[in-house]
Image: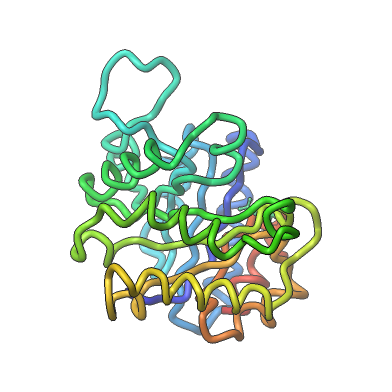
């Protein structure tokens, strides 16, 4: 279902106490100040999932998600977390294919396609990330590059499964750099991505939430989110400050 979503990706930051403080502050601010029907999703580091789920309990329109998962059910995979573990905490979203996972952990399209299926089989919602590095953008091949990521990561899904997927377009050159894509650049890519998804999934692509990520801040969020194909954001750095993140949520 196409929804307005702002997801905060905390990455590898915060202690348990800091995570509790951040989650409670942002949940309270959004409860007091946000009157829309969009969804806020908090994606803390996995040791804190259960704690954040408890803080979010009973809050309408607040979800909790993991930042990654393993593609297998269980077993001898030291250090990994499974989708059933994530589900058992009460979290309902999983970020899949973040560029940092692709780059630093060598996650390729074939593996990500398996992870997406695993998340869906578990009854969770994948937030599937795509996005081009600077060199590809400068070469002018960025639209094809990102379309290929979508084909390789998602086109094996049935229509029923694809309906549950959230897509996040995150140009790598904009992540953590303070360099945001302009709202025109975001809109152009999101529109192209939706057209591409339609070649496989038809009208369902009109119901897909496509989020923008890459240096979303309180002062650029409203402009980005005002564009017709931008359904919200995936936020890194600014999700670590409760006031900034709440202000971004208020912009959806
Ligand atoms: P950023 O990160 O907001 O710090 O650029 C976005 C992301 O990595 O999802």
Q: Position of residue 1 (x, y in %)?
A: 31, 74
Residue 243 quadrant:
bottom right
Which residue sits at x=34%, y=52%? 92
Examine the rendering and report whether any part of residue 240 can be seen.
no
Q: Position of residue 111 (x, y in %)?
A: 38, 36
Which residue sits at x=37%, y=69%? 197
| Residue 160 versus residue 85 in the image, above or below | below
Instruction: Kindly give the residue lying farthest to the right in the view shown.
Output: 178
- Say which of 35 and 207 sits in front: 207
- Say which of 120 and 198 sits in front: 198
| Residue 26 versus residue 196 in the image, above or below | above
Q: Position of residue 219 (x, y in %)?
A: 77, 75
Quarter in which the C terminus is drawn: bottom right
| Residue 247 versus residue 228 in the image, above or below | above
Q: Position of residue 131 (x, y in %)?
A: 58, 56
Which residue sits at x=68%, y=50%? 133
17 with respect to 203 (left or right): right
70 with respect to 245 (left or right): left
- Say which of 232 and 151 sits in front: 151
| Residue 90 versus residue 78 in the image, above or below | below
Which residue sits at x=45%, y=19%? 79
Examine the rendering and report whether any part of residue 242 can be seen.
yes
110 with respect to 218 (left or right): left
């Amino acid at each position: 279902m196409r929804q307005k979503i702002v997801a905060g990706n905390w990455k590898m930051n915060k202690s348990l106490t800091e995570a509790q403080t951040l989650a409670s502050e942002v949940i309270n601010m959004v409860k007091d100040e946000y009157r829309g029907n969009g969804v806020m999703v908090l994606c803390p580091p996995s040791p804190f999932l259960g704690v954040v789920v408890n803080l979010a309990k009973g809050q309408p329109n607040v979800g909790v998600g993991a930042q990654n998962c393993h593609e297998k059910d269980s077993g001898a995979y030291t250090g990994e977390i499974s989708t059933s573990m994530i589900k058992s905490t009460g979290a309902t979203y999983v970020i899949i294919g973040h560029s940092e996972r692709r780059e630093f952990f060598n996650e390729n399209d074939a593996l990500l396609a398996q992870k997406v299926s695993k998340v869906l089989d578990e009854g969770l919602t994948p937030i599937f990330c795509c996005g081009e590095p600077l060199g590809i953008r400068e070469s002018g091949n960025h639209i094809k590059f990102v379309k290929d990521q979508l084909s390789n990561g998602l086109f094996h899904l049935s229509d029923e499964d694809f309906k549950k997927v959230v897509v996040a377009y995150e140009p790598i050159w904009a992540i953590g750099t303070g360099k945001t894509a302009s709202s025109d650049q975001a809109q152009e890519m999101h529109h192209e991505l939706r057209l591409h998804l339609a070649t496989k999934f038809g009208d369902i692509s009109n119901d897909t939430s496509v989020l923008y990520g890459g240096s979303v801040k309180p002062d650029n969020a409203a402009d980005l989110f005002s564009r017709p194909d931008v359904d919200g954001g995936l936020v890194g750095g600014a999700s670590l400050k409760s006031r900034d993140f709440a202000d971004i949520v208020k912009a959806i």
